[in-house]
């Protein structure tokens, strides 16, 4: 129910006194209300829930956390640890 | 898709799993609140990857599941009125009421329509000025800004044929209830990322302080959830009980103020009944008196409808994390997504439906040696 997905604003327009945008999600576009992200501009990514953008994706933060995750790859790895022990946790 | 695909990277997921397993020294019970997170965890089999020390229990964060029977009965009563156009999110149509559901009302000729957004209902009201259009406004804090905006805009436009059946619920009062129960086993929570996108997480800081349990605000993709679990495990192992934010790309501590302002202009906090759980004080929203002209319960006189819950469904215990769906004798036999006995089997985000879809062929607990 609280499903919300990130999409990119391709066009903004005003309808019935409210600001709406055409937002592209992969190959699909939908209309979303921009009332709650007044600062959003064309090209920005917004997280959309039931036809409303509820946040502007913080590109810098997304980049930073993803880099931190990637850096974990450099950590010493226990080869095959999760897979090898899967069987014994089964029940 | 950007901001989705990279958070499903299997190589990174394996590193996170390894790191979680390295960090755990004793058993911990964690709960995710949100049904969307439940769906991801079960779909990707994340609990099975984590090892036997970490148990994930699934919280009451599926608004479809916790919408009380009496509200479903009210929806059915209103939708059955011949001139009414009744508009709902799709998930609510199959939720069983006392004697029927909205799909059956539709099959019997009722004008029940599925909407993606509350603004679709508003459009229907504009296009059908002679007919009452009623929107079934369910949801948590994530959905409240959108639903409230539909009423707010209807008032601005003077749309007299638009109204709303409101059954909004709030997450923190339900967590508080769980934590105050003597049977509570949950030691750490993944806080719901989209609820916190709207509300921020100051409320959760208060809960963490008061009950000395850690919270990590988490996203919805496998890497988000694995990272949230890792942060929670580290807190628990180090004896910390703080609120950390894993879902920083969407959530700030203060949340979305514009969204909150809109919903508080339209809604006010009220006691709500939760299906499977019962009444929780100050746990939901209703329309403010200024919006009484848009209140479908008043307009259609259904305020007095009440309904007792069927006793055999164990959804109450499932929604509180005390039982798993597979512990129910009806699971997968009398109760399936095609013939749901209780709400968690109805919504794809309900714990029972997620287990049925992804895990019904898995051996029951204790079956292996």
Image (tube, coloured by chain):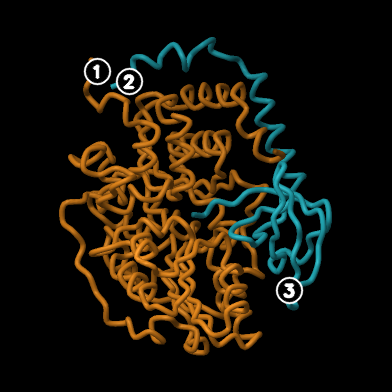
Chain colours: A cyan, B orange
The answer for which chain carries disc 1 is B
Closest to the observer, B109 or B134: B109
The answer for which chain carries disc 2 is A
Give a yes or no on whether discs 1 and 2 share a subunit: no
**In the shown orientation, is residue B285 left or right of residue A43?**
left
**Residue B145 shows in this picture:** no
Quadrant location, the C terminus of chain B: top left
In the rendered image, which residue does mark 1 sit on? B368
Closest to the observer, A21 or B225: A21
User: Given this view, does label 3 or label 1 mark the residue nearer the observer?
Assistant: 3
- Does residue A44 sit above or below A80 in this rendering? below
In the rendered image, which residue does mark 3 sit on? A18
Query: How packed is label 2: few (under 14 Cα within 10 Å), some, or many (20 or more)?
Result: some
In x, y percent, where is residue B64?
Answer: 40, 58
Query: How packed is label 3: few (under 14 Cα within 10 Å), some, or many (20 or more)?
Result: few
Marks 1 & 2, CB-CB < 8 Å contact = yes
SS at circle 1: loop
SS at circle 2: loop
Q: Which mark is residue A90?
A: 2
User: Measuring 32% from the left and 54% from the top, which residue is drawn there?
Assistant: B343
**In the shown orientation, is residue A48 left or right of residue B300?**
right
- Residue occupying the far front of the picture: B109
């Amino acid at each position: 129910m609280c499903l919300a997905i990130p999409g990119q604003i391709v066009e903004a327009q005003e309808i019935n006194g409210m600001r709406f945008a055409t937002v592209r999600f992969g190959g699909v576009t939908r209309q979303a209300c921009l009332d709650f992200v007044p600062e959003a501009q064309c090209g920005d990514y917004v997280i959309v829930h039931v036809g409303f953008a509820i946040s502007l994706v913080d590109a810098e933060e997304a980049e930073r956390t993803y880099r931190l995750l990637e850096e974990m790859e450099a950590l010493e790895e226990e080869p095959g640890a999760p897979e090898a022990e899967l069987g014994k946790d089964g029940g | 898709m950007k901001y989705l695909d990279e958070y499903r990277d299997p190589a990174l997921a394996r590193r996170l799993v390894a790191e979680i397993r390295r960090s755990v020294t004793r058993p911990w019970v964690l709960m995710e609140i949100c049904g969307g997170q439940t769906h991801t965890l079960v779909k990707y089999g994340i609990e099975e990857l984590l090892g036997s020390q970490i148990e994930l229990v699934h919280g009451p964060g599926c608004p479809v599941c916790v919408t009380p029977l009496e509200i479903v009965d009210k929806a059915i009563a209103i939708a059955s009125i011949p001139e009414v156009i009744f508009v709902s999110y799709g998930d609510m149509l199959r939720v069983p009421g006392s004697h029927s559901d909205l799909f059956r009302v539709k099959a019997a000729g009722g004008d029940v329509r599925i909407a993606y957004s509350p603004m679709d209902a508003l459009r229907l009201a504009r296009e059908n000025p002679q007919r009452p259009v009623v929107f079934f406004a369910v949801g948590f804090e994530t959905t409240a800004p959108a639903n409230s905006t539909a009423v707010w805009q209807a008032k601005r436009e003077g749309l007299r044929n638009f109204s709303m059946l409101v059954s909004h619920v709030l997450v923190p009062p339900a967590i508080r209830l769980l934590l105050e129960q003597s049977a509570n086993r949950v030691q750490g929570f993944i806080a719901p990322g989209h609820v916190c996108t709207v509300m921020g997480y100051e409320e959760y800081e208060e809960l963490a302080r008061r009950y000395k349990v850690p919270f990590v605000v988490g996203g919805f993709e496998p890497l988000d959830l694995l990272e949230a679990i890792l942060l929670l495990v580290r807190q628990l192992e180090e004896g910390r009980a703080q609120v950390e934010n894993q879902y920083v790309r969407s959530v700030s501590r203060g949340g979305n103020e514009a969204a909150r302002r809109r919903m508080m202009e339209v809604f006010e906090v009220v006691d709500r009944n939760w299906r499977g759980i019962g009444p929780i004080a100050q746990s939901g929203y209703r329309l403010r008196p200024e919006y009484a002209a848009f209140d479908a319960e008043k307009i259609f006189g259904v305020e007095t409808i009440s309904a007792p819950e069927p006793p055999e469904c164990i959804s109450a215990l499932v929604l509180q994390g005390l039982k798993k769906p597979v512990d129910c004798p009806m699971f997968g036999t009398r109760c399936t997504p095609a013939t749901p006995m209780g709400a968690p089997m109805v919504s794809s985000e309900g714990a029972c439906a997620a287990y049925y879809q992804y895990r019904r062929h898995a051996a029951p607990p204790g079956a292996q040696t």
